[in-house]
Amino acid sequence: MKKKVLALLTVLVMVLSVVAVPNVSANADEAKGEINFANGYDWTNQSTQFYAFASADETATAGSITGQGVGFMGWFSGVVLELNEDYNYVVKLVAPADGTNEAEAETLGAGKVAIIWHSDAATAHPETAAFFASLQVGDVLAPSTYWENIAGASGAQTALSFTKAAEGSKGPKAPTKGALNVVNGWGRIVTNGNVSDALDICVLSVNDASLNVATVTQGTLNWWCSMVLEKDATKGTWVVKVADLNPTDGVCACDNETLGENKLVVAIHGGVEDKESASFFLGTAKVGQEYYLIGELPAANLSQEGTALTGVYLSTEKPADPEPEKPGDEITPAGDFDTMATTALMMVSVALVGVVLVLKKRNNVA
């Protein structure tokens, strides 16, 4: 009896230890740094926020994205992260709050993120402050989303965060294409009070080389993200010639670009509905970037609504060429019949073998 009780107690202890250990590990892994505001400055909550800055523009800095210039956040602490081959981030720079915030002045570009915070933010968000303050150069972090989403984010954030990456883990990989929703127009527009949001990703295709972007758009792209692409006839790709990824300065860097055959303009408003496609473009649209056009752009006249598109994308990956049909690949009725006959013959053969084995077994028993 005592042996049975001891055995039961042993099993119970083992079960409890198996259940308890994962819970302890999970609690240890819950430490994370949560971002409160992205790619801008929160003038309402100001120094109580944790900020993330990312841009495909290799000349951009956190200071330039806020519009205040370098030195604005000199007394903020900061870290700079860089994407690795596993889609996680390596800490490249740790900057103390000493009046010269190197993280604010660090130039960005594809795969880089600057995270900046004031000491007031540590009081408002102590767990996040402890996480970022513990980081050292070389630490590897796992993001809650892919880099293009960080670059495309703007304003208050509720789901953007970083944790310590588990050994051998891989971060989320970004999509390789973005949808185009409307050609030669602005598509769906929703007006809330004095603010109008364009919900569609727009592309302008105007075969008139005497026109420029400002003329065609009547200067309305000043508060949009936009890019001008030109076709490389040799490669069959569309190459970014000019890109303006800052919608907050009231200036469109694409305005003076002429249009015409083999030129496209892609425009994205902050109210766009397809956030994934918008993030793809905002994360990849640097000068020299090559895209493949998937689908066809129909000939369409300029209008307020434009012409809706379905299944039209720009992609960083070359679409696979359709395989040519080989002679003899076609299945003829005769071929179908032959296949069915062969199958039927095999089934009958199997059945006959089964009958023979059963009879043989009976004879042996007899």
Image (tube, helix red, strand yellow):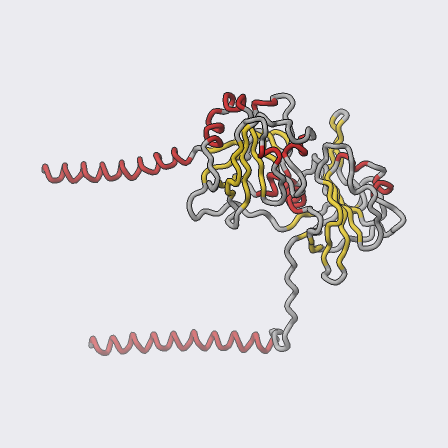
Q: Is residue 65 left or right of residue 32?
A: right
Residue 303: x and y, percent? 84, 42
Q: Nearer the viewer, residue 209 or 176?
A: 209
Q: Residue 72, relative to residue 278: is it above or below?
A: above
Q: Is residue 163 left or right of residue 105?
A: left
Q: Is residue 329 left or right of residue 164?
A: right
Residue 129: x and y, percent? 49, 27
The outermost residue toward the left is 1
Quadrant the C terminus occupies = bottom left
Q: Nearer the viewer, residue 131 or 147?
A: 131
The residue lying at 61 percent from left, 35 percent from top is 53
Residue 178: x and y, percent? 66, 48
The quadrant in which residue 63 appears is top right
The residue lying at 50 percent from left, 36 percent from top is 162
Q: Nearer the viewer, residue 272 or 124?
A: 124
Quadrant the N terminus occupies = top left
Residue 73: x and y, percent? 61, 27
